[in-house]
Amino acid sequence: MQLAMLIIIGLLSLAAAAAEAAEPPASSLPTGPELERAGAIVGDIYIEAQNIFDLSDPRENKALYRAANAIHIKTQERVIRQQLLFRSGDRYSERLLQETERILRSARYLYDASVRPIAWRDGRVDIAVTTRDVWTLNPGISFGRRGGANSYGFEIEERNLLGTGTALSLSHKSSVDRDTNEIEYQDPHIAGTWVSLRARYANNSDGSAHGFALDRPFYALDTRWAAGVAAGEDERIDSLYDRGKIVDAFRMQQRGAGASWGWSGGLQNGWARRWRVGWIFDDRQFEAAPGWSGALVPENRKLVYPWISYEMVQDDYGKYINHDQIGRTEDFHLGTRWSALLGWSDTAFGADRKALIFGTAVARGMAPSNKTTLLLSGSFGGRLESGGLENALFDASARYYVQQSSRRLFFASVQATIGSNLDLDQQVLLGGDNGLRGYPLRYQGGTARALATVEQRYFTNWYPFRLFRIGGAAFIDVGRTWGDTPVNTPSLGLLKDIGVGLRLASTRSGLGNVIHVDLAIPLDGDPAIDKVQLVIETKARF
């Protein structure tokens, strides 16, 4: 009897082993391309919306961090699920998983996102979607300084209201241009759709502004249609600058509205091609500002025009770390993107002139090696009136990255702008507020400018209080302007500065910015400017 039992047990063990050999365990996953070739079907989708701090990490399992997690309302599972580009029962697509990751990472209430297959059985593959929240309630005080001018603000902002992804903010801000009291509401997914709503109202020291936008964008490469409508009014005083000083000012009253519809054949052979048609109303009235001469007041403009545009986007993206952020996944577009727009403004539509409105933009990213990345972009736009160009503006830029190690990166950039017959309210300026850090803001003006920057960037392992990633940079900025305008005195020629800076990137805040603290020394320019400029500001990039 015992021998018979042993034989039976042995046969059962052999059968179990054979079954395991015929069907791999869930942990033995094919690669993404292999799943696609096998015709895999998406099975169960598991959403793991993680809190701000990882309490399984002893370094974060502290009383303060536990309290932050306890009072933070995590992003709701449905909010994550509605942004997925795939559903259970769909054919598995590695591309859609990667694009979904990029979409989720672009949400300011999420720090990072991972979308990956976790199990494979009977032709079905289960997917895990993991996200990590950031702290989105931001009450407090902000302060900045650049170009010798201070700015500050008081605000209370919630970028993920009740875990829904909705943003609501109340703020008071004071800058060199104006004091602003503002309320703003944004819902990126109305009723679980891809339709977004943005509404704002601002009561300013020099006027007011209000507007709304309802938009259904081309949210993914394979999106087949888009639509939008927007309207707003803005009244403010704008200043004209030379050598960092206001030389004149004017009041502008702007009313605008627009609507558009777009369609696409989706992603085909690695490209998404999109058409749009729309209508724009843009009325700008100008007058002298109180207390100023009014010698330099732009001409009134009223443009009303239908338009048509075309866009091509190549499906080619790269995933990076420690380039423009610190310790955070970054998505760079490494393909080509080109768009063009044509519109016709006519008095028959209610405009004050006949004009051909045109614009085109192109961007190209490339990775010549696994250590280098080059991002190029350019745009050209303006109006053609009475056979001549008006308010024509050409912009071009190049950004070059060389990853020397996981903690060191060389960065260089070049930017150029050329204008022709610019409207008076369209100044081409160069100074501490747009890259020439050793000089006052809006220091030099003209019809063209160029700026080159070289930085040696450092990314440390220092992570104080598990709240901020720390980095630093040594930099050189070189720039100049060209051309005469009614506003600006002749160019001072080539302007240079050198400096060092501290970078603090918040890993727990929904602000998503990098705090810059720079000390810059001007090497040229007017002897009256400060010998050292302190620049404190927040930027989207390093």
Image (cartoon, rainbow, N blue to C red):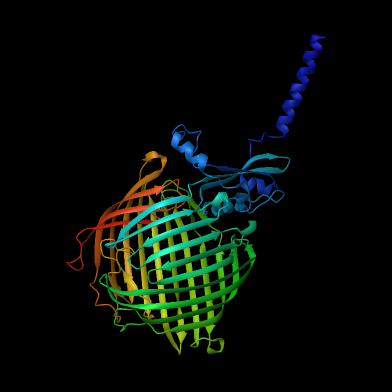
In the image, 33 versus 211, the foreground residue is: 211
Q: Quadrant of residue 24?
A: top right
Q: Residue 369: image x %, image y %?
A: 44, 53
The residue at 25%/71% (across/down) is 243
Q: Residue 441: image x %, image y %?
A: 29, 66
The residue at 46%/82% (across/down) is 383
The residue at 58%/66% (across/down) is 215
As drawn, is 4 to the left or to the right of 498? right
Q: Residue 394: image x %, image y %?
A: 41, 74
As drawn, is 225 to the left or to the right of 320? right
Please say whether residue 406 is visible from this viewpoint. no
As drawn, is 270 to the left or to the right of 471? right
Q: How many labels does the image show?
A: 0
Q: Quadrant of residue 128?
A: top right
The residue at 51%/33% (across/down) is 56
> With respect to residue 454, does 51 lie above or below?
above
Q: Residue 446: image x %, image y %?
A: 31, 76
In the image, 51 versus 184, the foreground residue is: 184
> With respect to residue 452, does 125 lie above or below?
above
Please say whether residue 329 is visible from this viewpoint. yes
* Quarter of the image where the C terminus is located: bottom left
* Quarter of the image where the N terminus is located: top right
